[in-house]
Every structure is written in C-alpha cells, then in structure tokens.
Image (spheres, rainbow, N blue to C red):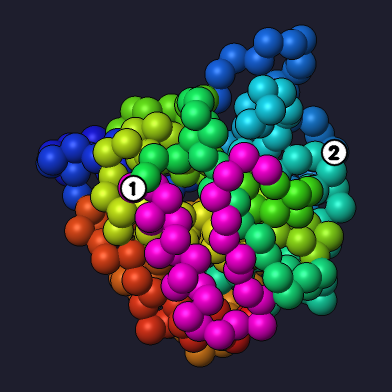
Amino acid sequence: MKKINFLFAATAIVASVTFVSCEKDQVNSPTEETSLEVEKDVLNKITALHFNPNGVEKVMVSDIDGTKKAAYLIEGDVLLSKSQIMDMGLHGGIQNKQYRTNNLVTATNVIRVVGYTGNNQYGLSSTAQTGLQYAVNNYNNENLSIRFVLSFGTSWGANDILVYVDNSINTDPNRSAGIAGFPSNGYPFTRVRINNGANLTQTNQQLEHLLAHEIGHCVGFRHTDWDTRKTCNENSNEGVGNDGLVYIPGTAGPGGDANSIMNACYPANTDGEWSNLDRVALNYLY
C-alpha cells in the first residue's frame, strides 16, 4: 500500500495513484476533556454484533455546526455513536455467508440527500456536486423501493443524509477521503463526510464512485471485499470470520466482484457505475 501505487484511501488524487479507498479518518484532537479509551461495555457489544473488535478507536468528530462528538471507528471505516452501537440488534441472527449490515432502512421510503453548498470550509465544490448528482441518479435509476431526493443548499432535516467537506479527515494519501456509518432505528446514517483533497482534486466520476459508496454504507452495505481488502493491495479481514456480515443472495460471495462500488478501494479510472452484482444486491434489499 505504500509502494509505487499509493492508495487514495479516498483522499487527494495524485498522478501515480492507482486506487482510492473510502473510509478510515483521522480527526482533530478533542477540545474538551473526553476520554478516548474504548469502554468495556461498548467493546463487548461490538464483539457481540460480530464486528471485528481489534483496532476499534474512540474519536472526536466535527459536525457541520462546529460541535464535536465522540464516536467509534470500527473496522477502519464505520463510524457509530455509542447509542447506535448499544441499540443495534442482530435482527434474526447472523448468516454465514456483496454484504450488508444487520440494520437496513425500514422507516421511510424517501431519503433526502442534501449536498452542502455553504460558502465556507464545509461546502462541496461544483465537481463534487456533479459527482453527488451522478451517484444519486445511479440509485434512483434502479427503481428501488427507496427513493433518493437530492437538493443543494444549507438547510437539512434530522433524518436527511447531509454530504459535506470535513477537514478533520486526514489528507495523507494512505488515509481515506470519505467516511459514513450504518442505519439505525430504520433510518439511514445522516452524515457523509469527504475531505478537501477529494473535494478539490478528484474527478466527477471518482466522486460519483466515492459518494455512491458512502451512501451505500448509510443504507446498510458493507465492503464487498471485507475478507481481504484486496482492492487496497492489502491482506486483512474486516470481520470475525464470516460472522459479521449478512450475505446477499445472488451475489458472488467474499471478494468476488472486482468491479463493485462497495469494494474497499477503487481504481483511479473508475467510471463510478454499478457492477452487475451491485445491481443484484440493491434490488434484493430494496
């Protein structure tokens, strides 16, 4: 990952970069006295949910209103609050087999996505706005049971997916350019953060891929190559065996779709479009 072909881990594009990855951010130091030690009850619940408990980080993340809140970074790319973790259930048990989480969007059929355009450090570039439009179109073109309504501006609702720039995400090309989380209480995760490197230097197709990927997490998808992260030139397992993932029938299984939008990393020449098996997965769940 640190040899000739640096991974974007979803940050700024460099001419020699071959892959872009999506999650795992590094945040600013907290401004308040908050312990960053992962509590035992949280770690026990993460383990019970069959996420990988190794390397869990408690971090302070900046919201668009300037506030900072504690959250837990799991498996390098999943950002969840303590209440989301403690309230999350297995919902029918774990299946052993492209992959989803145990939580999906069930409380609404219409998901509003807001691309933030404020004239400040949080605003999306015109290229990022185009990429977001392409990403949302790709979801709606599948005629799913959920529909996305996209708008651009500075106002959003409590259950909207707000997409904005977060400069607390590290810009090291071996870290990531985007971060999101999983659904809770039947609603999608409400924040998609990208760093300014991606915002200013990636193409609209790369941003289309990145933002479709992050929205995929918001509605319950996990990485297709969770078992190896081989698209990042890694050999690491995000889960505990196969237990932490729910297999989506009709898809290839562990790491079997090199073109999936939901792979952990993607080539710099991506066209940002779904693979055939991505479409199978989307239509099976929604």
Where 280 sits versus 179, above or below?
A: below
The magenta stretch spans residue 272: no
Badge number at residue 127: 1
The disc labelled 2 sits on which kind of residue?
Answer: Asp
Q: Secondary structure at mark 2?
A: helix
Where 122 sits versus 127, above or below?
A: above
In the rendered image, the quadrant that contains the N terminus is: top left
The residue carrying mark 2 is 41
Q: Secondary structure at mark 1?
A: helix
Where 260 sits versus 68, above or below?
A: below
Find the distance from the CA under tag 1 to the CA under tag 2: 43 Å
Q: Residue at x 82, y 69 (%)?
A: 107
Q: Residue 96, position in %: x, y?
A: 63, 76
- State the image quarter where residue 11 is shown: top left
Q: Which mark lies nearer to you, 1 or 2?
A: 1
- State the image quarter where residue 133 is shown: bottom left
Q: Residue at x 55, y 50 (%)?
A: 152
The magenta stretch spans residue 130: yes
Q: Residue at x 42, y 50 (%)?
A: 129
Is 271 left, or right, of 34 in this rendering?
A: left
Q: Is residue 130 visible?
A: yes
Q: Residue 273, position in %: x, y?
A: 34, 71
Q: Residue 120, position in %: x, y?
A: 50, 26
Q: Residue 153, position in %: x, y?
A: 58, 44
- Magenta segment: 127-155
In the rendered image, the quadrant that contains the C terminus is: bottom right
Is 124 left, or right, of 58 in this rendering?
A: left
Where 101 sits versus 28, above or below?
A: below
The disc labelled 1 sits on which kind of residue?
Answer: Thr
Q: Is residue 54 visible?
A: no
Mark 2: few, some, or many residues within 10 Å (few <14, many ≥20)?
Answer: few
